[in-house]
Image: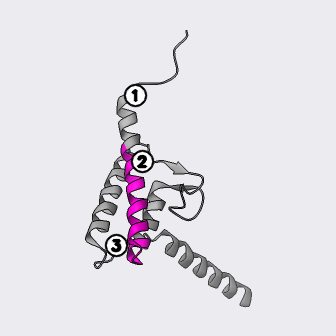
Amino acid sequence: MRFSALCAGLLLFSAALVQAADEKPVLKDDVNAGVKAIIESAQEANRQAAEAGLEWFWAQPSDGMWEGANMDNGKILDQAITMANEGKNIAARKAAAFVENCARKAMESAIKNKGAGPSDYF
C-alpha cells in the first residue's frame, strides 16, 4: 500500500513539473512600452519563420544575450520576456531585436532562394 501511494505521489509531482515547464512567460502590464513593442514584433516575425520551418536554432548564446545552450528563437524570446518583466529592458530589447532580425533574414533568404536545392545530375 505504501509503495503504490509513493508511486502515485511521484507521478503527480512529475506531472506538475512538466506542466510548469510548459508554461510560457507572459509580458506584465507594467513593462516598458518600447520593449513590449519590440518583443511582440519579434514574436510575430518568429511565428512566421517557425510556420515556414525556418526557426533558427543556437548551440551557444550569441554575445551573452541569453542563458543556456541549444536554444531556438522561441526560447530566447521567452527569456527576453522574463528579462523585460524583471526590468532588464536593455537586455530584453537586445535579445528580442536579435531574434526578430534572425527571423526576418530567414524569411528573406527562403524567398530569395525559392526552389533552391541539389542539382539534378541525371
- Residue depth check, mark 2 versus mark 3: number of the one nearer the observer: 2
Which of pointers 3 and 1 lies earlier in the amino acid sequence? 3
Residue 117: % across, % down: 48, 24
Q: The residue tagged with tag 1: helix, strand or loop?
A: loop
- SS majority, magenta: helix
Tell me the residue that label 2 is attached to: 102
Residue type at tag 2: Cys
Residue drawn where x is 41% and y is 41% of the image: 106
Residue 7 is labelled as none
How far apart are the two marked residues, 2 and 3, measured between alpha carbons? Answer: 21 Å
Q: Is residue 28 above or below residue 114?
A: below
Give the color scheme: rainbow, by chain, secondary structure or one colour. one colour
Tell me the residue that label 1 is attached to: 113
Residue 67: % across, % down: 56, 65
Whether residue 1 is visible = no
User: Circle 2: is it few (<14), some (14-19), or many (20+) Cα within 10 Å?
Assistant: many
Which of pointers 1 and 2 lies earlier in the amino acid sequence? 2
How far apart are the two marked residues, 3 and 1, measured between alpha carbons? Answer: 36 Å
Residue type at tag 3: Leu
Left or right position of 72 against 49 = right
Determine if the magenta segment contains residue 25.
Answer: no
User: Circle 1: is it few (<14), some (14-19), or many (20+) Cα within 10 Å?
Assistant: few
Image quarter of the N terminus: bottom right
Residue drawn where x is 43% and y is 67% of the image: 91
Residue 29: % across, % down: 28, 78
Which span is picked out in magenta? 83-104
User: Circle 3: is it few (<14), some (14-19), or many (20+) Cα within 10 Å?
Assistant: some
Q: Nearer the viewer, residue 64 or 25?
A: 64
Tell me the residue that label 3 is attached to: 27
